[in-house]
Amino acid sequence: MSTDAATPIQIVIDATDPLAQARFWAEALHYEVENTTDLINRVIEAGLATRDIIHEDDGRLYWNDLVGVGDPGGTGPRLLFQRNPAAKTDKNRLHLDLNVGAERRDDEVERLRQLGAEVLYEIDEPGGHHVTMADPEGNEFCVQ
């Protein structure tokens, strides 16, 4: 058995609108959109970036092409939304499962619909019950 600690991960997700996707997933996962205002100001003041690669939204500065969200408790993985101008055209090679439990599943599906997700289909079989949904840019995920 290895004595090494677990390797922390970051999940990077392509998005045509990184900030909108970050906001959706922050709400969906009860995460927070990272406030990069101080970092961006330091980088610009140091002459390492110019204002044409950032934008201001709701009093905060964000990179145009990268927006992160994180677990406020610090236990979940960080999600980084990276601009990719190509729209999603095929099934995901990776998807997230939101494990909320059978007693919360229906309410969670409705909450996610209110945030802009769409129900694609539902599977109810002896081995499990889950709802496959799509986020606002069409990325599939499951609620179980």
Image: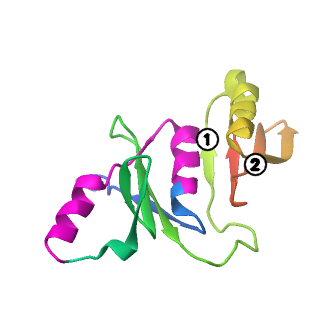
Name the residue located 53 percent from the left edge and 48 percent from the top edge.
Answer: 23
* Amino acid type at mark 1: Leu
Residue at label 2? 133
Among all residues in the image, which is located at the extreme left? Answer: 46
* Count of marks placed on residues: 2
Residue 2: in sight, yes or no?
A: yes
Q: CA distance from mark 1 to mark 2?
A: 11 Å
- Residue at horizontal 72%, vertical 25%? 107
Q: Image check: 23 left or right of 116?
A: left
Judged from the image, the secondary structure of the residue bearing numbered disc 2 is strand
Return the x and y of residue 12 as percentages of the image width and height: 48, 65
Q: Is residue 121 left or right of residue 51?
A: right
Q: In the rendered structure, which segment of residues is drawn in magenta?
A: 20-47
Say if 83 sits above or below 115 in the image.
below
The residue that disc 1 covers is 98
User: Which residue shows up at 72% across the image and 36% down it?
Assistant: 114
Check the picture and name the quadrant holding the N terminus: bottom left
Residue 30 within the segment the image draws in magenta = yes
**Magenta: main secondary structure:** helix
> Residue 27, located in which quarter of the rendered image?
top right
- Name the residue at 69% across, 54% down: 136
Of the two numbered discs 1 and 2 on the same chain, state the one appearing first in sequence.
1
Residue 133 percent across, percent down from the top left: 75, 48
Three-letter amino acid code at the position of disc 2: Met
- For label 2, the crowd category at 10 Å Cα-Cα, with few meaning under 14, some 14 to 19 and many 20 or more, is many
Q: Is residue 46 magenta?
A: yes
Image spot of residue 31 (x, y percent): 46, 40
Quadrant assignment, res 49:
bottom left
Residue 142, image x and y in percent? Answer: 70, 46
